Image (spheres, grey):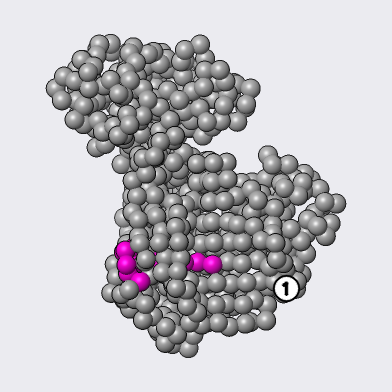
Amino acid sequence: MSIILPSYQYSRIYLGKIKVKGLKTNKEDKPVINLELERLKSIGLKDMFKDKTFASNNVVAYFPVSPDGSYAVRISENVLNEINTMSSNDPKSINVLYLDLINQEDPTRFENQLIIVSASKKLDSIFVTSLNFDSTKPRAWVIFYFNRETLRSILKDELKEKDIDVDNINYIDLEYGSETYNLHGEFYLARDAQFFPKSFMKRISEEDEKQIYSQSFNIYDLSVTTSSLTIDEIHVGGSLYIKPRSGKIPYQYPFVIPFTYSKGSTIYPDDLYLNSFSLNIKVKVKLDKINDFIKNFLQYIKRSDHLLQSIQKIAMSKVFVEGIAECKIAEYEDIIRVERNTHFLSDRSKFTSIMFGHLIEIYKKFVSEGDKIKNIVDNLDVDKFVEKLTEIVVENEKKINYNNLRTSKCMDELKQRIVVSILELSLHGISHLIKKALISKLSLNPGDLGEYIIIKSPSILIRNLQILDGFYFYDTLTVNEIQGEVKIFVKRSYSYDTFNFFGSKDYSDVIDSIKNIIYIKNQDFRCDYNWAHEKLQLNRSYQILQNDSRTVNNVKLSDCITQLDGYIKGVVGSHVFYPPRSMFRYLYLKKFYVENQIFKCNNNLDQNQIDAIYKELKRPLQYIWPRYVHQCFDGCYSCVMLQKRECELIDVQQEYRISKAGALFLLQI
């Protein structure tokens, strides 16, 4: 196992030890692990090869360092094992390597980070923090890789006395230097951590643009061109994403891990594609057609089962949410922001990470407000629609300045942003559909195609944003229209010479392929057809489970299965809005919720008996809940979503940055 170091603005690494001082309680009477981090030795990366600690036994061979010596890529277990044998063996301490990215002059800074790696033979766990938002106290993003049994062993007596386990503790007080950091976070299994590579596209030049299709749909214009594109794909690292198999909420570390980019230098490992073939889809919306565009979009997406899912994606978009603050409709801290920004290269270039707790807040609002949103859409009242979306993403409606919201200036600004959001979602969906069609038509592999989305608008947002997540690019316009374009290009130099035959007939073939991806006979959605067949199979499995005569602790498992089925049907089946499958278990299948249903089957059970029944029900659960939750959340792997490494975004982010309904709306198919 290698430990990815999720940072890059450092040139030294530290040897230290963590003293486990015991358990205590905080003001909320919650258990807190009290740790003290002590620095033993500082090592400059450039001098690492000369250092006796690292030079012995070829430790440096397992410790890749950037070419200019400004940061290390990752740590191998070989390094950690060797360091552990060199360090003292205090039974109450843990030997560690760590990075200190704390601003000593301002320990309250948002960017402060500590990455701590236990020098252990087996690193099976990670503790990660959500930031302490009290800006008056010392705070830091902390990742602590450690061995769970080591920590359990040191705290054995205190854990036994309080009848808790390390996994159930969410607080750590970390004493470091002259400060104490009150950390709030989660323990995860290291096996659940994934690394998603990141890159950003830099367009160098574009030539030989040729139009092969154009159509005016009254409210917007659509055109298709081919061109010879020279583009540089610059690899900047990646994102640490923890997707637990338990009921814990997923976690995405907010900072990009740049293993190939060094700030202030010219180290840019990249892939330069010269004269590559590019297929370009362009959309133009006149500002005086914005109301009609939004109305037509809402009318169009009503024909699918994903109306509220599509709308939720608009409400959550960075474009719309930041408009509320820009127009002074609500204070920034009162807005539910699902994505967190990390600046890269400049203040106008950003990578984002999901705040899963905030995402769940938005789900709950759509469940409670779904019927009201649907009624507004049925009446096609665009102003009311804008107002309702604003109420959804502001934590408390009383914090909304309705006087500002209802001015023509703010209302027009938010409508522009809704159109920009629709274009972002829809063009991304078109891009993925075209990728799937081109793979077979041009005999390409999934990794051979890249995407590049450009949005141009007079909106305030565009003046504050330039690059988002490496492939969304923004620019200002002086003309009274909003423009969106997606470029799907072949990641091969001189591929334009190979594919420049592509014309209107080939584009027509691509559209036919997209129709085959989306529809079956009679224009029924393939995703609906797939789910209907899945439900038939799951219902058969459910009937078998209901006939299960087994008992655990004198409780019939079939009774618990029926109870759980009623619970899931109640929380999902009775609402017009449903969450995506990727997040369902974190919303409704947490262990506490399932145990509550078990208790309803027999309220005389103790915790050990409930645990035994829960263990037996974990497998059957997978045959119950998918019967009520559509596999497609206005986008799934059967239609517009792509597999890992075929899109820059992690699965949940991709789900919220793409729209099948929007793609079909723009293509009018």
376 shown above or below 210: above
| Residue drawn at (62%, 72%) of the image | 284
Question: Residue type at mark 1?
Answer: Lys
**Magenta stretch, residue numbers:** 485-496
| Residue drawn at (54%, 41%) of the image | 346
88 shown above or below 379: above
Q: Is residue 157 magenta?
A: no
In the displayed structure image, the side of residue 241 where residue 214 appears, left or right? right
Q: Is residue 212 visible?
A: yes
In the displayed structure image, the side of residue 44 where residue 669 appears, left or right? right
Which residue is the site of mark 1?
289
- Pinpoint residue 32: horizontal percent, then vertical percent: 48, 22
- Pinpoint residue 331: horizontal percent, then vertical percent: 73, 41
Q: Quadrant of residue 242?
A: top left
- Pinpoint residue 400: horizontal percent, then vertical percent: 78, 48
- Pinpoint residue 629: horizontal percent, then vertical percent: 48, 64
Q: Is residue 487 magenta?
A: yes
| Residue drawn at (32%, 29%) of the image | 69
Q: Secondary structure at mark 1?
A: helix
Q: Quadrant of residue 385?
A: bottom right
- Number of other residues with Cα within 10 Å of mark 1, as a class: few under 14, some 14 to 19, many 20 or more: some
Q: Quadrant of the N terminus?
A: top left
